[in-house]
């Protein structure tokens, strides 16, 4: 019996080793592709941010970008009225060597300043070329050259069950790698019918948004965008925007700053088996027209409520979710052929696709203009009061920040912080007054780095800043 038992164990061990040898080699893939992934920090309300490693005065409420990525539980409120903490973090990846970067629109939504950190720790202020909220795609541009560029793959070649890998910055932990398989393709989400999402079980968390989804060939096949959660954490369902959809969007954003989508002016619903039988359809497929916009393209072409749309420009419509994707991908002004079912027979019509009303929000671009009286770092400083000296336990000297903008805001300093020391080219200078601080700052060249020892309440830390290069 012992001999048989040992034999079984050996056989089992051999089987497991063979299986292990067939598993993907993720380490090489992750090492090769990590350089194209970037970390993105978008500033919204600089005065509300907190400095790194300094304890905030109060625990911040859940920010709006996190509420979007982690849907609220069904048995709780919808999160309306929760204050924004002023900063969103996410990921992105380089698609052109001269500094074009793709990310999610919700990562940079309403941003006044966008900071991009490369894998080699270089940092750049980014310009928002354009953002499209319907597809959740945004295009950024940084002033850099010869950047490593992501190779793009074909999402159509993905199969359910294929291995995929994500690289991003969940919760700010940069260059984190997670892996899983493709769970489904062409997935429609509520209010997201224009994007045929790739569903995976890759672990995605806040901060992964906008990062790349790779196939095993090291090609980007999607942009990680959303998760489904009833608990506020990852539950095994992640959704990525197919890279071909994203690249079409970015091409339009680069050309005109916005995306033009086609529409035909109908409301549709799914065709169930019972509806198909009632309309004498041979099969339960297509998109049933439930409403027609007066004066719209469909109305002018003679489409009526109760028609079942079965093909658009020769492409069969199997499910109602397919029609919005096909139509929206058609450029406005295109004459298109529509096949539909009415009165028990197939009919056809020709219509001209029109565009959606302009839904692009005005984007607040970053401004280098500092408030009156601010120094080159964007700080307004004042002598500390007696109360402030006691509260912050300040010795003689030190200055208190009264207003924050520019580079200081990006470093997450805030009003009420006290600056005790200034470190320049390896030498530490005790700060004794706002005037002396600005005199020391005058010796730092454009683009130069410096350190500040900052006190906030009972805690303190060194904060690194870099002067603007221009």
Image (cartoon, rainbow, N blue to C red):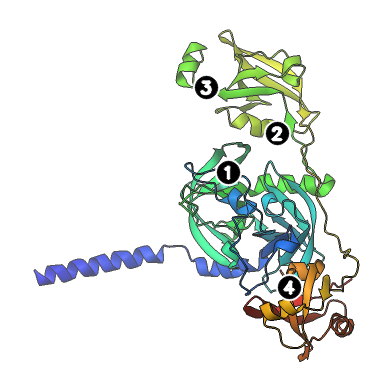
Q: Quadrant of the N terminus?
A: bottom left
Residue position marked by numbered label 3 in the rendering: 271
Vertical arrangement, residue 26 with respect to residue 196, above or below: below
Q: Pick whichever of labels 2 and 3 is earlier in the sequence.
A: 3
Tag 1: Cα neighbours inside 10 Å, few (<14), some, or many (≥20)?
A: many
Q: Depth check: 30 or 169 in front?
A: 169
Q: Depth check: 444 or 86 in front?
A: 86
- Please tell me in which quadrant of the rendered image residue 426 appears: bottom right
CA gap, disc 2 to disc 3?
A: 21 Å
Tag 2: Cα neighbours inside 10 Å, few (<14), some, or many (≥20)?
A: many
Query: Where residue 17 sits in the image (x, y, percent)?
Result: 34, 68
Element assignment for label 4 = loop
Q: Which residue is the extreme one toward the bottom?
A: 427
Tag 4: Cα neighbours inside 10 Å, few (<14), some, or many (≥20)?
A: few
Q: Depth check: 118 or 388 in front?
A: 388
Q: Which residue is the extreme one toward the top?
A: 343
Q: Pick whichever of labels 1 and 4 is earlier in the sequence.
A: 4
Q: Pick whichever of labels 3 and 1 is earlier in the sequence.
A: 1
Q: Pick whichever of labels 2 and 4 is earlier in the sequence.
A: 4
- Please tell me in which quadrant of the rendered image residue 378 appears: bottom right
Give the number of the disc on residue 328.
2
Residue position marked by numbered label 4 in the rendering: 122
Q: Pick whichever of labels 3 and 4 is earlier in the sequence.
A: 4
Q: Which residue is the extreme one toward the left?
A: 1
- Please tell me in which quadrant of the rendered image residue 170 appears: bottom right
Element assignment for label 2 = helix
């Amino acid at each position: 019996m012992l001999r048989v038992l040992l034999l079984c164990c050996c056989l089992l061990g051999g089987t497991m080793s063979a299986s292990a040898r067939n598993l993907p080699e993720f380490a090489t893939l992750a090492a090769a592709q990590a350089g194209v992934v970037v970390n993105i920090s978008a500033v919204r309300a600089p005065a509300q941010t907190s400095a790194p490693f300094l304890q905030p005065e109060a625990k911040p409420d859940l920010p709006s970008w996190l509420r979007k990525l982690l849907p609220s539980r069904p048995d709780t409120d919808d999160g309306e009225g929760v204050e924004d903490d002023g900063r969103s973090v996410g990921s992105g990846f380089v698609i052109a060597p001269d500094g074009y970067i793709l990310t999610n629109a919700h990562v940079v939504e309403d941003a006044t300043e966008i900071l991009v950190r490369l894998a080699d720790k270089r940092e750049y202020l980014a310009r928002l070329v354009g953002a499209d909220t319907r597809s959740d795609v945004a295009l950024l541009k940084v002033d850099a050259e010869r950047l490593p560029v992501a190779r793009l793959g074909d999402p159509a070649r993905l199969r359910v069950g294929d291995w995929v890998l994500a690289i991003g910055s969940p919760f700010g932990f940069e260059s984190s790698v997670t892996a899983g398989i493709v769970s489904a393709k062409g997935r429609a989400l509520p209010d997201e019918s224009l994007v045929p999402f790739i569903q995976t079980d890759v672990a995605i968390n806040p901060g992964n948004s906008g990062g790349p989804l790779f196939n095993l060939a090291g090609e980007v096949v999607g942009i990680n965008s959303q998760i489904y959660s009833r608990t506020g954490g990852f539950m095994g369902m992640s959704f990525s925007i197919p890279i071909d959809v994203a690249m079409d969007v970015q091409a339009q954003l680069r050309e005109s700053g916005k995306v033009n989508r086609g529409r035909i002016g109908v409301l549709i619903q799914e065709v169930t088996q019972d509806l198909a039988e009632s309309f004498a359809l041979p099969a339960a497929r297509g998109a049933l027209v439930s409403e027609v916009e007066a004066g719209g393209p469909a109305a002018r072409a003679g489409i009526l409520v109760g028609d079942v749309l079965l093909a658009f420009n020769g492409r069969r419509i199997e499910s109602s979710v397919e029609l919005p994707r096909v139509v929206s991908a058609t450029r406005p002004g295109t004459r298109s052929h529509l096949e539909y079912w009415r009165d028990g027979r197939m009919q056809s019509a020709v219509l001209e696709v029109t565009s959606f009303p302009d839904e692009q929000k005005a984007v607040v671009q970053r401004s280098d203009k500092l408030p009156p009286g601010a120094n080159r770092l964007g700080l307004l400083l004042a002598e500390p009061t007696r109360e402030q000296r006691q509260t912050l336990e300040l010795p003689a000297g030190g200055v208190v920040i009264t207003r924050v903008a520019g580079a200081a805001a990006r470093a997450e300093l805030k009003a009420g912080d006290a600056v005790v020391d200034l470190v320049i080219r390896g030498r530490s200078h005790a700060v004794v007054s706002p005037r002396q601080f600005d005199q020391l700052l005058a010796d730092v060249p454009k683009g130069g780095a410096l350190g500040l020892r900052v006190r906030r309440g009972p805690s303190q830390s060194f904060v690194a800043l870099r002067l603007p290069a221009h």
